Image (spheres, rainbow, N blue to C red):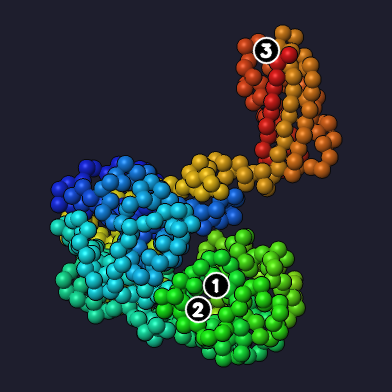
Amino acid sequence: MTEVAGSALVPPPPLAEGTLRVVPLGGLGEIGRNMAVFEISGKLLIVDCGVLFPEETQPGVDLILPDFSYIEDRLDDIVGLVLTHGHEDHIGAVPYLLRLKNDIPLIGSQLTLALIEAKLQEHRIKPFTLTVAEGQIEQFGPFECEFIAVNHSIPDALAVFIRTEAGTVLHTGDFKMDQLPLDGRITDLRAFSRLGEEGVDLFMVDSTNADVPGFTTAEREIGPELDRLFGQVSKRVIVASFSSHIHRVQQVLDAAAAHGRFVCFAGRSMVRNMTIAAKLGYLRVPDGILVDVKNVDNLPDDRVVLMSTGSQGEPMAALSRMANGDHQITVGKGDTVILASSLIPGNENAVFRVINGLLKLGADVIHKGNARVHVSGHAAAGELLYCYNILKPKNVMPVHGETRHLIANGKLAIQTGVPVENVLQTDDGSVVDLSGGVARIVGAVECGYVYVDGSSIGEITDADLKDRRILGEEGFISIITVVNRSTGTIVSGPDIHARGFAEDDSVFDDIKPKISSALAEAVMSNKDHTAHQLQQVVRRVVGTWVNRRYRRRPMIIPVVLEA
């Protein structure tokens, strides 16, 4: 398999005429932040623009965006942004891109555009949109795009087949091959076969489940399990899922109706998305089944189902706040909480913390590990093999997944006959050029994480996050000392204060003489020492002492003033 050479950043050559350039700006080596840029004849087409949710090692971060610096000075060359479906990891960063240029055309299915328009309304952006459907062909500058129906865990998902003078690309977006979907809309393998006959020069394919053997379980198998659980619970049921998982919500509504229960949507994004889905006809809501959250306490416990956000342990989501006792809905003994979603890598600790909190409150917690309450929305290895055999692509570029998923997907392609040298194992920022049926990695561009922290976008760095981790895990020590440079004597201090390190500052009494001695020696040995150099002397003395005595590495802030 063709792999990116180490971590070296080799700038790509100028784009040759008649060549298609593909640059993934996110979604490779991670679950989320999906975004790919296509360039030919001086024009750019973007597919997806999603966010990545932070891990515990990124304290204070709200969202992680793709790095737009590659296209920031080319915004006028963008002919369109194709959105394959409405999940946050594919549309969540659109508002931040449109802040740079708000008239970039958005192209997607009816539901996908409705979801992003609602999100953009909160950002006070009115987008230019084009609604497309499966089978539709549209021309965007030098790119001809044909849209193909694919099945996923959200309705109206689309793959896109891109035709250019340099060759063709099939980008699947996220997909699976559920043969009995709830909405009857299957992945269009007849269209895949037709495109295979035409010729697929580059296949960019979802890798999330590439290391899972066999076939993904059908969504409709969740229904009987929910029905069974609803039938045996005597008090309230709380179901947590992604706020855009319309198929899952539909099965909850159906099970609730069958057992005479009312349903309440909890969580702002859940209410917003399900209102949109119902209005457009993607969600069938039985008459009279919905109740407002304000009226839940007026209903008997055995007549209530709460459909909530927070299945990934997000601290501000409804379920997390319930677990912390910080929500208007209280969870108690006899209630049953169903986590009807997968566990995104990196969220394990947050999810288990919510589960533990709910169990302490007396609730029963049902999750994927102890009941069939979730199935994946991504194609497993067996489904991917079918796709490779149907399409017979010349080149394959696994996308959407961690490194282990991308490599597993590449091995599947090789098993079906794709030459090893034609399977491109790429990273975010890799530059792939396609010409004459040959795809090759020709370099890489800078492509880091862009952190959203409150109203701050891109101002937080990895160094800032390291400082936050140190503060959170090791504590903080400040040392203030006033020195007479001419005599080398300590005029005042050292005054030492700590937070998150020790309850009593008297633990530092032993180190104060050593600080004074080290400063005096430094000043007398060199009268030209700068304040910064003296501060470094203090940092070394305190750091060495703390490490030897306490085996800890707190943040040390020395301040040396001159009298």
Q: Is residue 185 above or below residue 330?
A: below
Which numbered disc, 2 or 1, marks the residue that appears first in the sequence?
1
Query: What residue is rendered at 78% in x and 28% in y?
Result: 495
SS for callout 1: loop
Instruction: Say which mark, if any, is on residue 525.
Output: 3
Instruction: Say which mark, if any, is on residue 87.
Output: none
Query: What residue is rendered at 54% in x and 82% in y?
Result: 252
Query: What residue is rendered at 27% in x and 79% in y?
Result: 189
Left or right of 98? Residue 375 is right
Left or right of 529? Residue 521 is right
The answer to whether one can see residue 84 in this image is: yes
Front residue (pair 302, 229): 302
Q: Position of residue 447 (x, y in %)?
A: 39, 47
SS for callout 3: helix
Label 3 neighbour load within 10 Å: few <14, some 14-19, many 20+: few
Mark in the foreground, 2 or 3: 2
Q: Quadrant of residue 483?
A: top right
Q: Position of residue 193 (x, y in %)?
A: 22, 77
Q: Quick one: quadrant of the C terminus?
A: top right
Q: Is residue 6 above or below residue 175?
A: above
Tag 2: amino acid: Arg
Tag 1: amino acid: Ser
Front residue (pair 145, 383): 145
SS for callout 2: helix
**Residue under numbered circle 2:** 248
